[in-house]
Amino acid sequence: MADEASNSLAASLEGTDLSNLYSVIDKHNVHGLNLVVPEDAKAIIKPWAERDDTENYAESNVDDQLIIHIPFHERVRIRSILLKLGRGESTPRHLRIYANYPNIIDFADAEQTKAQLGISLLEGETGVVEYPLRSAAFASVHSLSLFFNEAVGEEQSRIYYLGFRGDMRSTKKEVASELTVPAPHANDAPISSKAANRAAQQPTAR
C-alpha cells in the first residue's frame, strides 16, 4: 500500500507548480560530508526540469552515511522535501533532518544533536517522491542538514535529486505590506489626536 501511494504521489507531481525553493538555495555554499566527490553535493541541487537526470549524483564514500548541508539566501518555510534516490542496494532507508544547525560539521556532531525529524525513506521508487514536513520547526529555516544512512546494501548511498517545496518568508511580508494602505482622511486619525483637536476648539471659561 505504501508503494502504491508513493507511485501515485510521484505521478501527481508531474507538470505541477511545486512552489519549488530552488531559486533561494545558496547553492554555492551547499556542501557534503563523506562523499566520493565533495562537490557532488551541489550537483544534486537541480532545477525541477532536470529532476530525472541520472548523470549527476552524490554518492557516499567509505560507508553508507552522508550529510548534505543546504543554506538558503533567506528564511523560508519548508513544507516538503523532494528526493530521487539511488535504487537497489544504494537506496538510503533513513533520513534525519536538522533545521538551523549550521555548525553540524561531522558525524559525531550529528549523532549527539537531536534531529527535528526522522523519516523512513521508500524503496524501489524510480521518480521523485515528496515527503511532507509538518513540524513547526520548519516554519522559519535558514539552513538544513540532511543525514542519510542505512542503505539497503549497507555499503553506499546515492542521491540523484534533492529539492524543497515551501514559500519564502519575505514574500508574505511584502503581500501584507501591500494590503496595508494608510488612510488620508481625518476620520482615520488616532483617537488621541481627535480628542486633542476637540479640546483646542472648545471656548475657555472666563
Image (tube, grey):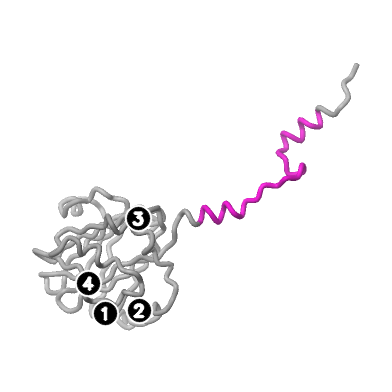
**Which residue type carries mark 3?**
Phe
Give the number of the disc on residue 125.
1
Above or below residue 58? Residue 2 is below
Mark identifier at residue 72: 3
Which is closer to the viewer, label 3 or label 1? 3
Residue 143 point in image, percent of width and height: 32, 54
Give, as a three-letter code, the residue at label 4. Asn
- Name the side, left or right, on which 38 lies relative to 10: left
> Disc 2 to disc 3, how far (Cα)?
25 Å
97, above or below 7, in the image: above
- Labels 1, 4: front one: 4
Q: Earlier in the sequence, mark 4 or mark 3?
A: 4
- Mark identifier at residue 56: 4
Q: Quadrant of residue 205?
A: top right
The residue lying furthest to the left in this view is 62
Labels 4 and 2: the sequence-earlier one: 2
User: From the image, which quarter does the N terminus lie in?
Assistant: bottom left
Label 4 and label 2: CA atoms lie apart by: 20 Å
Task: Identify the residue position indicated by label 2 in the image.
Answer: 10
- Residue at screen point 22% across, 67% down: 94
- Locate residue 204: give its quadrant: top right
